[in-house]
Amino acid sequence: MVNFMKYTEFRDIKNLREKLLTQLGIFGSENLIVKINHYPDYDMTEYQGSYGTDYVFKSSWQFPMRMQSVSFVSTGEMKIYHFDDLKRMSADSDIAFFAGQEEQFINRVFDDAPELLEDYGIEPTELDDFKLNHIRVSTIDNERRKINYEGTFFGDSIAIDPIDWAVYVHVNIAYIPADVSNEFYAELIGESLILLDAEKINLFYFLLFSAFESFVNSSLDVDDPERIVEEEPREKDRLKSKVKLLFTRRFGNITGHQVYNSLMPSYTRFKENRNVIAHGKGRLILTGKEVQEALLFTLIMILSYREKAARFDELKEILQQDHS
């Protein structure tokens, strides 16, 4: 007897949400190198001139237009590169370098000749007159397309605003792509995730349900509404009937469809909560479990239909494919 993976096992896959979103083209992640502006905030630390002291800095980095919104940023390795380092890397790699485009150049080297980043530059703790103590991402401002960061360093007046060197830090960015999809439902899911990151939970939930409804309607692809009525079972919940019709058309008999039969029981609660939000009847406080269930329901149902996968082990295999 074959033992197929159960939903409870599938649900425990590490980073499942991100893997589902990536597979659906609604999520992306990149490793980039960012040039840091460590000019001090003199409201936090007083200027000491040529005397070395600890300074606090606060600045921001504008993320690329290909990212609609950023949901997570982590920082990694840091290194100081001198102007001469960049020119030598350019000569060694045949990658053109132009003054004022240091960050663009460094990232091209990172993509095409990453070993040069190890060969050149120094650690930000190796200088006597400048030491970067720490740096962290403070906030993500998707409205202004900025990642705000802050940190501290030890240095004197010469190290405050260097002319011919800078600190560069590796960052890993999780984001929703600007060209999230040609499908309207995918765009709605992307927008709902922005609301979730902003902790606007009820709006997220409402828009997520709209995204699922949009997916079902667009996937049925029937111009004549009466034809749908004739084909679908006579149920009070029209959308639920459409979902059943959609999967029946795709898979045939869905009596043994593991994904459909495991997830559809949670649809009722999803719909009920959505209606409370839509009609404003009372104050609804959604739990983290309800938010997680609704999001996984939506993403898994869409992926199951799109990839024609009826079992969770099939979906797991799809998620393990290399998309680099």
Image (spheres, helix red, strand yellow):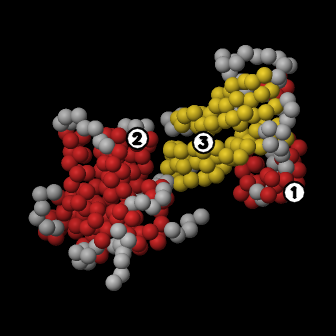
Q: Quadrant of residue 38?
A: top right
Q: Quadrant of residue 308?
A: bottom left
Q: Identify the secondary structure beneath mark 1.
A: helix
Q: Identify the secondary structure beneath mark 3.
A: loop
Where residue 194 sits in the image (x, y, percent)?
44, 43
Query: Which residue does the numbered mark 2 point to in the structure image?
Result: 195
Q: Can residue 179 be seen from the camera position used here?
A: no
Query: Which residue does the numbered mark 1 point to in the structure image?
Result: 92
Q: Identify the secondary structure beneath mark 2.
A: helix
**Contact, mark 3 vs mark 2 (Cβ under 8 Å):** no
Q: Quadrant of residue 51?
A: top right
The structure residue drawn at horizontal position 34% and vertical position 73%, both measured from the top left corner, is 310
The mark that comes first in sequence, 3 or 2, is 3
Where residue 29 sits in the image (x, y, percent)?
56, 53
Q: Is residue 96 left or right of residue 290?
A: right
Where residue 3 sits in the image (x, y, percent)?
36, 77
Could you tell me how far apart the alpha carbons at marks 1 and 3 are, in whole angstroms?
28 Å
Query: Which residue does the numbered mark 3 point to in the structure image?
Result: 63
Q: Is residue 95 left or right of residue 289?
A: right
